[in-house]
Each structure stands twice: as structure tokens, then as C-alpha cells.
Image: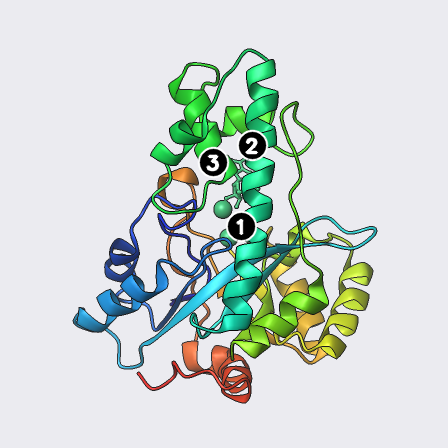
Amino acid sequence: MIDLHLHSTASDGTCSPEELAERGRSLAVMALTDHDCTDGCARFLAACGRDKRDTPVQVRLPGIELSLDPGEGYGQFHLLGLGIDIDSSALTTFLERIRAGRVARNVKMMEKLTALGMPVSMEEAQHFAGGQIVARPHIARVLMEKGFAKSVSDAFERFVGKNAVAYVSRYRPSQEEAIEVIHAAHGAAVMAHPRFWTSDARLLADGLARLKDFGLDGVEAIYQGNLPLETPMHLRIAREAGLAVTAGSDFHGANKPSVTLGMDVGDDEAFLAPFLDALSRRGCHFLQN
Ligand code: AMP
Ligand code: FE
Ligand code: FE
Ligand code: ZN
């Protein structure tokens, strides 16, 4: 079992980096991929280093998930940066710009909610955020606690989800720039959950061929939220594009209660070999353990 897509309290998950390290101790390979921040990575790696190991091979990677401009005709583009050097100055400068866009967007959403008679302050949202990232699930949580919504998903449906009344979009970097920054930080650039980018096999194949030319390394072809037929389709399209594949759950703890940690990929080492090759080509330093 492996899992290359996990969120901690450093962004919008409800488990601390240490809890993730502990809960994933039987996984051969695991990466922490918080939204727009790497603040949980050092604690995650330190906790993984302390734990007794249950598997012969154990690779633990610092990572990140970035929301990018999806391009005309596509839905959402999320990029995973895996095995990144979290001290890279190219990466830290880039993330500061993204986080400034997130703060500006949150202020506008709170103004809209207040105008709708549902005041939410930054302090209230920060109360539910474990770190510096305030994301829509934290705003949704405030709406729930104040009785304006029945649950986080109800708050998304009626108020903060895409197309809902208080939604405001935020700054999204280009695919080319984000891939370049991940490579400058010696990580592998992997498209997360391709199903949210497009459900059209042709658009996916065309898009991935173009992204491969920009240097995209892989695709999260095995995703816990996939429909049964999507996984074989994504594996085939990734293989045809010459891209490595990864597997991830997108675990968020209690913020996405139906998602469980760990993905069964059969033979872990055989499945991940092309991805691990890509990581070493990019100069990733985290493969020794
Ligand atoms: P943001 O980055 O602030 O735009 O928030 C996006 C995050 O909201 C995603 O990463 C998801 O974790 C979460 N999210 C999106 N839709 C829902 C939903 N319907 N229910 C719960 N969480 C959601
Ligand atoms: Fe999230
Ligand atoms: Fe995502
Ligand atoms: Zn995610």
C-alpha cells in the first residue's frame, strides 16, 4: 500500500503531520501534500523517522498541492510537487505569491458572506485552521458552527462551493511556471486527480501530451475518488503519454470523512519504479530511506 496525496492540519486536513506519520506506518511510500504550504513537512518527516517501521521499504516524501490555471475547456488542475526541497528559494517565493492571493480571496468571500447576513471573520476561520492556510473548509466550518449550515458539505453546496453565492476565485499560476518551480526544487511534477481536469479521454490525452513537453513527470492515475472505469483509462492514457503514475487518497481526515488512508496498487515497487526514476532524475534527495 502507498499514498502520495495527504493533507494535514497545516492546510485543510484534520490530522496533524505526526498523526499522519503514525497512521501511515504500514505504507511503503507516503507523501504529505498540503495545499500551497510545506509547513507540515519537517514535522511529518521527523515523526516518520522516529517511528518503528512495519515495511522493508519505506520512502517518505515532502510534497505540496497547487491549484493552477486549468486552461480553456478544462475544469480544475491540481499539481502535486513530490520530493521537493522545501527550502528552495524559487519555491518559497512562489508560494508566498499564491498565499497572498488566497488571503485576498478569503477577505472578499467573508465580505460577501457578511453582506448576506452570515458574518465570518478571519479570526473565526483561523480558529479552525491549524496553520497559516485558511481554506474554504475552515470558512465552511465557521458557517456550520454558527448555525448557518447543517454541515461542511452543506456550506459548500449553498455558500462557498464553486458557483455558490459567496464563492470568489483566487489567483492560479500557469501550468508551465508551476512545473518549472517544482523542478527547480528538485521534485517531480504530478497531475493530481485527472478526473477533475476533464472527463473527456481525448482532451486528457491531448493535454497530457502537451504537458509532457513542458516536463510533467506523472499522473495520479489511481485516485480514491475515481469511478471504477476511470482508473484503467487514466493508467492507459498516462502510459501512452510516456508519463509515470502515482496513487493517492486525498485524505483530509474529518473534513472528507469517506476518504481512507492508503491505496492498494498491487506490487508497490513495480508500480512506482517509473515514478522513483523520475524523482531521481529531478535530483530528489529523499530516496535513501
Ligand atoms: P480553497 O483552496 O480555499 O479554494 O479550498 C478548496 C478545498 O476545499 C479543497 O482542497 C477541498 O479540500 C475542499 N472542498 C472542496 N469541495 C468540498 C466539499 N464539497 N466538501 C468539503 N470540502 C470540500
Ligand atoms: Fe483540500
Ligand atoms: Fe486536489
Ligand atoms: Zn488534495
Using the image, tell me which numbered label, if any, was put on residue 17: none
> How far separated are the C-alphas under marks 1 and 2?
12 Å
> Label 3: which residue?
137
Q: Is residue 32 left or right of residue 232?
A: left
Which image quadrant for residue 94?
Answer: bottom right
Name the foreground residue: 105 vs 139. 105
Alpha carbon separation for disc pair 3 and 1:
16 Å
Within 10 angstroms of label 2, few (less than 14), some, or many (20 or more) residues?
some
Q: Position of residue 279 (x, y in %)?
A: 51, 82
Amino acid type shown at disc 1: Arg
Q: Position of residue 65 (x, y in %)?
A: 53, 58
Can you say which quadrant of the picture contains the C terminus? bottom left
Residue of label 1:
99
Circle 1: element type: helix
Q: Residue at x 54, y 64 (%)?
A: 93
Residue 90 appears at what percent x and percent y?
55, 71
N-terminal of the pair, mark 1 or mark 2, is 1
| Residue type beneath disc 2 | Val
Residue 216 in which image quadrant: bottom right
Residue in the foreground of this view, choosing between 113 and 17: 113
Amino acid type of disc 3? Pro
- Colour scheme in the image? rainbow
> What residue is shown at x 63% (from left), y 64% (from top)?
232
Q: Nearer the viewer, residue 68 or 236?
A: 68
